[in-house]
């Protein structure tokens, strides 16, 4: 087979454009989200978003999941369960959030057990960067929350480092004024259930969006290149 010459930037641009088209096509079939709106990033098989939809029938909920198969199955489960207040979109959240929501539109964003990407050559795929946090700062309304959980201690330390000096987010603990008051009611994700069953620790962040405006110059906090894997291996959360 003869292959055509395609430049790398051109190939990437086409690939990204296909993704943008897919988000546009999905959005054209979705009813507008009415506030309050909450988003789960990396909804995987959809257990959390489905539980949340049952818990909060009056809220609009969106799961964003970049594995097509899980996004489709989750959408189907929501339809089968008659949960019209929740949807799941197959997309990279870095493309989807800027396209779908104006600034300040979101009441809450959950990032629950983000992929650690242990290896040095994969470190740049990690979600938590200064740019990502500024994207979330733009989309979450002042007084809203960014909720993060991880079972990977160095990732927790990294998130702590990235967020502790940001004017846009203020760390809270359940029970504090300004903290989410419904933490105990939240459903557990697939991974969270496994971690708890194994008696392993979970690091939790309840970050309240302050009034500080997001910045266009988030700076460049270097990613730790390697995260040490814990001694105990945990089953693949996608199963
Ligand atoms: C470790 S799994 C955790 C899944 C689930 N939250 C749980 O706790 O069981 C991380 C999920 O995030 C998804 N993901 C990673 N990066 C993403 C991105 N940029 N946009 C959307 N989903 C993403 C992955 O496909 C995967 O399903």
Image (cartoon, rainbow, N blue to C red):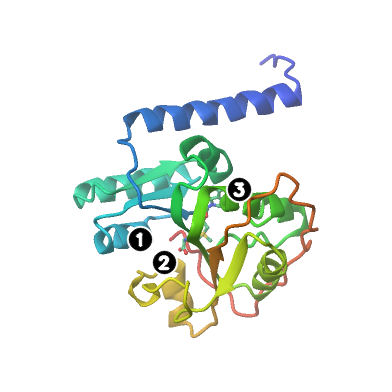
Is disc 2's CB within 8 Å of ligand 1?
yes
For the C terminus, the image quarter is bottom left
User: Residue 145 vs residue 116: left or right?
Assistant: left
Q: Find numbered disc 1 in the image and state the secondary structure of the residue it sits on.
A: helix
Q: State the separation of the CA atoms marked 1 and 2.
A: 7 Å
Where is mark 3, residue-wise? 135
Name the residue located 48 percent from the left edge and 46 percent from the top edge: 67
Discs 2/3, front:
3
Disc nearer the start of the sequence (1/2): 1
Q: Which residue is mark 2?
A: 190
Q: Are marks 1 and 2 in contact (CB under 8 Å)?
A: yes
Q: Earlier in the sequence, mark 3 or mark 1?
A: 1
* Residue closest to the eye, 34 or 192: 34
Q: Disc 2 and disc 3: Cα gap in Å?
A: 26 Å
Residue 47 numbered mark, or none = 1
Picture coordinates of residue 83, whole percent (x, y):
23, 51
């Amino acid at each position: 087979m003869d292959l055509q010459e395609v430049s790398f930037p051109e190939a990437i641009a086409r690939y990204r454009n296909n993704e943008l088209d897919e988000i546009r096509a999905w959005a054209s079939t979705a009813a507008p989200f009415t506030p309050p709106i909450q988003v789960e990033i990396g909804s995987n098989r959809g257990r959390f978003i489905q539980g949340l939809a049952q818990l909060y029938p009056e809220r609009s909920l969106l799961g964003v999941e970049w594995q097509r198969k899980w996004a489709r199955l989750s959408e189907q489960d929501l339809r089968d369960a008659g949960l019209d207040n929740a949807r799941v979109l197959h997309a990279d959240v870095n493309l989807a959030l800027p396209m779908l929501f104006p600034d300040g539109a979101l009441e809450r964003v959950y990032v629950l057990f983000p992929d650690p990407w242990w290896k040095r050559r994969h470190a740049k795929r990690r979600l938590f960067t200064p740019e990502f946090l500024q994207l979330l700062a733009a989309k979450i309304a002042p007084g809203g929350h960014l909720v993060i959980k991880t079972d990977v201690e160095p990732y927790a330390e990294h998130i702590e480092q990235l967020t502790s000096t940001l004017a846009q987010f203020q760390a809270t603990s359940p029970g504090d004024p300004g903290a989410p008051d419904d933490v105990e009611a939240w459903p557990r994700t697939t991974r969270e259930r496994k971690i708890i069953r194994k008696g392993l620790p979970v690091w939790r962040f309840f970050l309240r969006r302050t009034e500080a405006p997001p910045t266009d110059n988030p700076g460049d906090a270097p990613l730790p290149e390697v995260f040490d894997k814990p001694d105990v291996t945990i089953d693949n959360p996608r199963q």
